[in-house]
Every structure is written in C-alpha cells, then in structure tokens.
Amino acid sequence: MSAQNDSRYDPYIPSGNASSDPSGGGANFSNSKTARIHSEIDNTISIMRDNINKVNERGENLNSLQDKTDNLAVSAQGFRRGANRVRKQMWWKDMKMRIIIGIGIVILLCVIITDYAIWQLRASLEALEAEIPTHRFRSRRPIVPSSSQSTLGIPPRRIDPRSTFAQHHPRFTRGSMLSSASRTGMLATAGRAGLVDASTSFKLARPASLHRSLASHATKAAKPPTGILLMNMGGPSTSTTEEVGDFLSRLFHDRELIQLPFQSRLAPLIARRRTPKIVDQYNKIGGGSPILRWTRTQGKAMTELLDQLHPETAPHKVYVAFRYARPLTEEALDEMAEDGVTRAVGFTQYPQYSCSTTGSNLNELYREIQRRKERGAPEGDISWSLIDRWPTHPLLVEAFTNRIQAVLDTYPEDKRHKVPIMFSAHSLPMQIVSGRGDPYPAEVAATVAAVMTRLKWSNPYRVTWQSQVGPAAWLGPQTSDTIKGWAKQGHKDAIVVPIAFTSDHIETLYEIDIELQEEAEEHGITLKRAESLNDEPTFIRAMAEICASHLSNVEGTPNRNNDRRGEDVWTQGYTSKQMLLRCPGCVNAVCGEQKAFFGRTPQP
C-alpha cells in the first residue's frame, strides 16, 4: 500500500471509513475546526476580561493609594502644626528659664556688689575715724564687762557679729566710736581713782591701750606675762540651739576646711539644717562640749610647771583661741592686749599638722594680726613664734602609751597581747590628702609608729579614720567599718585609741563611746577605749617641756631639759622646719603669707 493512499498520514482526512461516506466526513471536519476557533476566541476573550479586571483592580489600588496619600498629607500638615506649637512652647519655656537664670545672676551680682560696697563703706569709715583725734574704742568681743571696766566706767564691748548665728560675714566686723560724753566721764572716773591725771590728754586706738596705760600706772611697770596661745577647733560649751548653730555656721564658713559654691549663702542654710541633730548629740554627752574646760585645766597645770622650767620668760599665761567656738581668736588677742603681752607662742593642740586644722587656726591668727596692724593697734606688734606640730615628742608618746597600757592591763595575761588596737583619727577628704598633699596622714602614722615602738609592737594594730561626712572619698578604712570587718573575722575584743585628740570632746564622747560602742555590741565585739589625754600628768609635763624647749631655742636661754633636747626636733626655731614648706597643691595665698610671717622668712 502506498503512502498517498493511506488516510492515516493525511491530517485533514478524519479517521474512520471516509471512503464509504465521503459527505459525512467533511461535515465533521468543518465542525471541529469551527469549535477550535470558537475555543480560541473564548480563550482570548477570557484573557482580555482578566486583563480588564486587572486594569480595573489596579485602578482601584491607585485610587486607594491616592486616598492614603491624601490622608498622609493631611496628617503631615497636622503634625507640622503640632510641631510648631511644641516648638513655640519649648522656646517660651527656654526663654522663661533664661529669664529666671538671668534674674538670679543679676540678684547675685547685686548682692555681691552690695556686700562689697558695704565693706568699702566700712573701710572708709574706719579710715575717717583714724583721722579724728578722739578716743576710739574698737572691740569685737561680746558684752562681758571686766572688773577694770566696772571700776573705770568703760562701756561694755560690742557683740561680735560673727558670734551670732544670723550674721555670717566675718569681714563686716568693725568697731565703733565712743561718744565724747562717755570718754569725758571715763577719764574723770580714772582721775578720781588717782590712776591718771585729769589734765592729761590721751589718744587711744582701743580699750586695750587704756587698760595697759592704767595698768602701768597701777603696777609700776610690772613685767607682762609671756602669752601661750592654745589653739584648737573648739566646741559649744552648751547644747543650746543658738550656740551649736553659731559653731556650725563658723565651721561651714571656713573655706580652708570646706569649699562650697556660694559658701557665704549656703553655709548658714547647712548649719541650720544640721543644728537639731548636733544639739541632740551634745545633749547625750551632758549638754555641751568639755573641750574648753579641759583646755583651761591643761593650760593652768602647764603654766605652773613652765614657770619653773623656764623662769627667764615667766610669768606665763595661757590664752585659748578656738576656731569655731568661743573664745575666738580675736577675743584671745583682745585679752592679751589687756594684759600688755608683747611676746607670745602659738601652741597648737593638734599634735599632727593639717592645713584644715592647725593651718586654718594659724591663717585666722595671721589675718587677725594683720587687721590690727592696719588699725595701728599695739597688740599687732606682739612678737610671735609657733609650736605648729609635735607628733613624736617623747613625752606625748609616753602619755599615749600609759593610757593604752592601762587598758591592756584589764585583760587576762593569756590574751592581753592578742587584742587588736585601733588608732582612730579624724578623717580628711582625699581631695585634701592626695590633691593638695596634706601631711596629716603621715604625721598620724608617725605618732602611731612611735607609740607601737614604745609598746614593743606587742599587739596587732591598724590606723582607722572617723567622722566622715558626705559621699566624697575620704581617708579609710573607717573606724566603724573596721569593727564590722573584725567581727566577721571572729574577733571578740578590740581597743580604740583616739590618737589625734588631746582631750575629750564630741568625737570621743559621742562618736566612739556611744555610736561605735553600739555598733561593736551589735556585732559581738567587746570594745574598750583608751582614756583621752586630758590631765594625764605625763601629758601635762609634755606640754610644759615643749614650751620650755621652744622658748629656750628662740630666746637663746638655757635649756633645763638636756636629757630630751636631742629628741625634741619640733621646737628648734620660730616654727618647725616642716611649717615653712607649703603643700604641693596649695592655692591659698594666705597660707604662704602666714608661713613667711611666723617663720620670719621671705615668701617664695
């Protein structure tokens, strides 16, 4: 069979019996083709419909996007309006803050200018008074009439503005003029007493000058005493709100101890806030600090012995100059002027020197001397020398050792030398120690080493620090933390020695005897305190020998303490050799002037 005759190979010839029914096969072929065309048309239409639907859907999406875009535009416009309102509010708040700050600065400048103007006015008035040839009486001591005042009719002196809690500007303290009638009455009274000639004309700068003139007539040129000025921090003698407040106010005003911004304004506020708490502490130790009583007791016993040890400068008289409580430095100088003192020794009661303790006392003494020199007051010409530190004096070390040994003797012999000893001293901020280079920690350590050497290093010991205030870094470890640490280590006994204090006051009687004792009991430690030096006989002897040795070296007189002359390295000049060296970080100009003045050396 040939391919041309085979219908299976012709795509246009339907399968089946085509030759038997030619007319029926053609019809089927035509219908199939039409159906295929219709199917393709339907597919095309369907595709077109789908495309149209997609186009419509995209159009709807575009409309939706347009709506959203419009909504976003409206929202953005609202946001811009809100941002503008907030911006205006913030600008106004910023302006108000700037206005408030500006007003504050203006007020502060006005206060400073006013303060300066008042100071200048007072200085001008003083200069004017100095030119008036009348009797003037300038005294800043409180109203405490002396016996001579009562006899001669001298009016009581004015109260020191710095001694009141509300007045806290020490530089505004100035004197006043006595009326002509009062002067006339005074001279008339003195004339009737036979002490002065009524026809004599006096030109006096201070009541002290009058006292010395009258005293010289009455005593026929009696030898004035050599003044021994005992300097210390001081403390309120009573627990009244006024006295404690005055004490704290002076303390927080001292920039050599504490430096605060706007200190003249902040100091009284801080003092008022702390006063109730400190009043309560003083009430718990008997209603005031015993430091003045102990200082006078020590001074009286010392001068009695000093008159025997160094008669060349006898009689000797003690004057007390506290930095923050009465009697203040100016009151002590007033008293020295009344006694006609021409030679004086400044004797610090801090055995270990610190710029914030002895340094502050000496700066205040120097400032007061200069103020009196400027006024031409005779007491400004007193010849001064200093005992500015004595941390390792043999008798001081012996006195501490005696107090410690008395406590050690209360323990059984088998545990006597196992009890740890805490040598507790007042702490200092690290800014003063490491920033300024204060020698205080080294001198405390020197005292402790000397005491332990005398004890033959018989007990374990540590130097600890107390009285930390505020969040800043201070010398450590703290005394209270040491107690807690020893308790955790299993210690049951401890001895605390107040190594930087020469008498009892609030830091021994309250901080150690009450607060620290309670902490020790809570942690299961039996704490015993070595008694403060107070009137311990060896300590009194130490004070007298230190003064005698100092006067001997300065005056060139015989030294009757030859057995200890080589050991006493602290009294071989107008000041100690250490006194002349300023701290590396010192920025206080008064400190340099003070050292040059007392050391009688040119200022570097």
Image (cartoon, grey):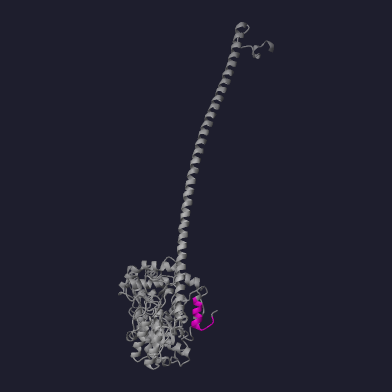
Apparent side of residue 230 relative to residue 17 in the rendered image (left or right): left
Task: Reply above or below: 107 against 286.
Answer: above
Relative depth, front residue between 602 and 107: 107
Is 600 colored magenta in this rendering?
A: yes
Drawn side of residue 55 relative to residue 158, left or right: right
- Considering the image in quadrants, where does the N terminus appear? top right
Q: Where is residue 496 in the image (x, y as percent from the top left)?
A: 37, 75
Q: Note whether residue 418 is visible.
A: no
User: Above or below — where is 84 with respect to 296?
Assistant: above
Q: Residue at x 39, y 94 (%)?
A: 220
What percent of the width, then of the height, locates residue 4? 69, 11
- Identify which residue, 286 or 253, lies in the foreground: 253
Query: Magenta segment, principal secondary structure?
Result: helix
Q: Can residue 351 be seen in this view?
A: yes
Rendering coords of residue 595 (x, y %):
50, 80
- Stretch in magenta: 590-602
Q: In which quarter of the image is the C terminus?
A: bottom right
Viewer-proximal residue among 93 and 110: 110
